[in-house]
Image (cartoon, rainbow, N blue to C red):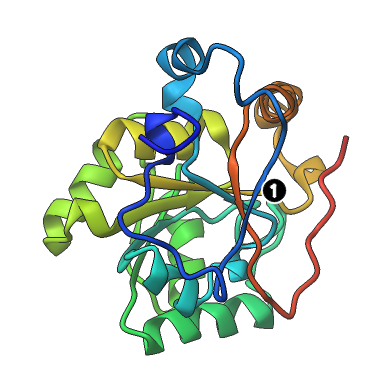
Amino acid sequence: MNSNGYPGFRMSQPVNKSVISFQKENPMENHYPFLIWLFLWPFLPNYKVNVVNELTPAILHQLDIKYILLDVDCTLKRYDADVLEDWVLEWIHSLRKADIQICLLSNGKGKRIGKIAEQCQLPYEAMALKPLPNGCWRVIKRNQWNKKQTAMVGDQLFADVAAGNLAGIRTVHVTPIHPETEPIFTRVKRPLERLFFRLVPVQKINGKNDQPAEPAAE
């Protein structure tokens, strides 16, 4: 349990502030913290970033994260894009070079996600049925990953973050890339996510990156 009383924000080890800094997303931190955690814990990410490449190898090392389950649509690319941009490929390469293992974990169909996985040369698990944790568990078991050193990274509170929390691993929420390109059944949940972040404090990672944050559509 951290200094704000939220069990979901516990970090595995002290953080070097010269590498990473945290900011509160919103100041409701002293208002019934236990009740907030009790009812909302499946959707509470441990950390939040604007863009995935803010999760630099140095920051992940400080957080003791060695294994990443990585969402695809609106986390790495626009929903309607068929390929990843160069900055995403460079970020993935930097993590692999630092011996951080990655597996794509998507609710998308195998053929489409397989093409993305081939482009970035990563293993993948499609049709993961997030927010169910089964996809997370399959990848962790198959690769013999340490759950304490594994994180789920994605843009949807009610899918990616919930799946990771239910699987018992850490979670990182990413501001979605062009959510206006998403299917309607995903877009209808975005106002609830924005309301959530206005009401609940979340630890925000401020990492350095070369790619400006994509604005989220209102």
Which residue is at 68% across, 51% downward? 79
125 left or right of 120? left
User: How would you rate the neighbour count of disc 1 (Cα within 10 Å): few for under 14, some for 14-19, many for 20 or more?
Assistant: many
Name the image quarter holding the C terminus. Answer: top right
Q: Is residue 44 left or right of residue 65?
A: right
* Residue 32 appears in the picture as rendered: yes
Residue 80: x %, y % from top left: 72, 54
Quarter-wise, where is residue 17 in the image?
A: bottom right
Judge by depth and name the residue closer to the eye, 158 or 184: 158
Q: Is residue 131 visible?
A: no
Q: Is residue 6 above or below residue 25?
A: above
Q: Where residue 200 sits in the image (x, y, percent)? A: 63, 26
- Answer with the quarter of the image where residue 15 lies: bottom left
Residue visible at 48% across and 85% down?
A: 93
In the rendered view, tell whether residue 210 sits above or below residue 161. Answer: below
Left or right of residue 38: residue 44: right
Q: Residue furthest bottom?
A: 97
Q: Is residue 80 above or below residue 206?
A: above
Mark 1 secondary-structure assignment = loop
Residue that protrudes farthest toward the front in the picture: 3
Point 73% across, 80% down: residue: 210
> Is 62 in front, or is 31?
31
- Amino acid type of the residue that numbered disc 1 sits on in the rendered structure: Pro
* Vertical order, 77 against 44 (above or below): below
- Give percent across and percent down for residue 39: 45, 11
Q: For mark 1, what is the residue? A: 176
Name the residue at 49% across, 68% down. 115
Q: How many circles with numbers are drawn on the protein?
A: 1
Q: Position of residue 54 (x, y in %)?
A: 61, 68
Is residue 66 left or right of 58 when viewed as pictured? left
Q: Which quadrant is home to the N terminus?
A: top left
For the view shown, which residue lies furthest in the right direction? 218
